[in-house]
């Protein structure tokens, strides 16, 4: 139940933020695009034996790809929230290592997995009460039964990416961050938000939505 309250609060923060930033959204659509920033952190989980699921060098190319795409397509500078990559301090429960991502990840989020992620985020990143400028955390998990990456969109401040997909689908990390910033799937094969691929483009209106996310700030 705590998880549901938490996500309801995130959605409330998102709605307020979107209302406040409506004038900026309209300005962005007509070309107002000074550089904004987004704080991002990747947290690599450890398995039952305490072994990290990925090395820094496995994660950094995907992180750099997200940085490159968001800068080029949306004028958003991705900055590390403290460190770019951190390894979880202790082994994760199976529910968090092998996520299901069915029903839009709600079942994972409202169970042991979500509780573990919220606890870890509280230890590794400082959130903000009104959600303005809250960092996005990418958890590297061992497996996912239905997808390779998963996000509950604006309801959570975290997304998940499968460890083995980091190298083969480098843009997936940026794609999941796009969901956390309010973007939904696109049918354009060249688009970052296409479920297959993904590509690296963002339309102007997508960039405007991403830029006015509660995670993206001027300072
Ligand atoms: Zn997606």
Image (cartoon, helix red, strand yellow):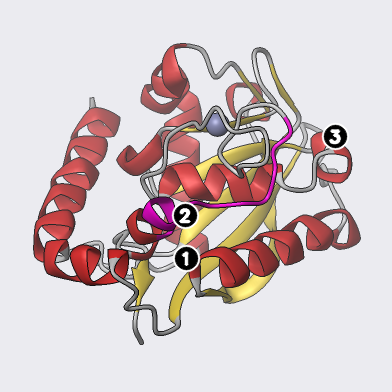
Instruction: State the quadrant of the N terminus.
Output: top left
Element type at marker 1?
A: loop
Q: Is residue 202 magenta?
A: yes
Tell me the residue at 50%/28% (across/down): 113
Specify the label residue 125 is tagged with.
Answer: 1
Instruction: State the quadrant of the C terminus.
Output: bottom left
Percent position (x, y) of residue 53?
A: 82, 42
Q: Name the residue under label 3.
A: 164
Q: Calculate the distance from the C-alpha at mark 2 to the C-alpha at mark 1.
A: 5 Å
Tell me the residue at 66%/47% (across/down): 173
Q: Can residue 194 be seen in this view?
A: yes
Within-10-Å neighbours for mark 3: few <14, some 14–19, many 20+:
some
Q: Which of marks 1 and 3 is nearer the N terminus?
A: 1
Mark 2–mark 1 CB contact (< 8 Å): yes
Mark 3–mark 2 CB contact (< 8 Å): no
Element type at marker 2?
A: helix
Q: Is residue 48 left or right of residue 16?
A: right
Span shown in magenta: 197-207
């Amino acid at each position: 139940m705590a998880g549901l309250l938490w996500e309801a609060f995130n959605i409330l923060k998102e709605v307020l933020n979107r209302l406040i930033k409506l004038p900026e959204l309209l300005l962005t659509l007509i070309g107002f695009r000074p550089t904004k920033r987004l704080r991002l952190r990747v947290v690599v989980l450890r398995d039952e034996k305490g072994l990290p699921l990925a090395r820094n060098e496995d994660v950094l190319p995907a992180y750099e790809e997200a940085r490159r795409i968001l800068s080029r397509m949306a004028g958003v500078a991705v900055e590390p929230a403290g460190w770019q990559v951190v390894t979880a301090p202790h082994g994760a429960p199976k529910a968090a290592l092998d996520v299901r991502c069915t029903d839009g990840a709600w079942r994972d989020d409202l169970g042991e997995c979500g509780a573990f992620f919220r606890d870890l985020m509280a230890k590794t990143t400082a959130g903000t009460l009104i959600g303005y400028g809250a960092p996005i955390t990418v958890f590297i998990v061992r497996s996912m039964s239905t997808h390779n990456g998963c996000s509950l969109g604006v309801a959570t401040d975290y997304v998940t990416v499968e460890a083995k997909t980091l190298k083969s689908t480098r843009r997936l990390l940026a794609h999941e961050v796009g969901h956390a910033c309010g973007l939904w799937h696109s049918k354009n094969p060249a688009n970052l938000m296409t479920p297959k691929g993904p590509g690296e483009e963002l339309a102007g209106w997508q960039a405007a939505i991403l830029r006015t996310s509660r995670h993206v700030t001027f300072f």
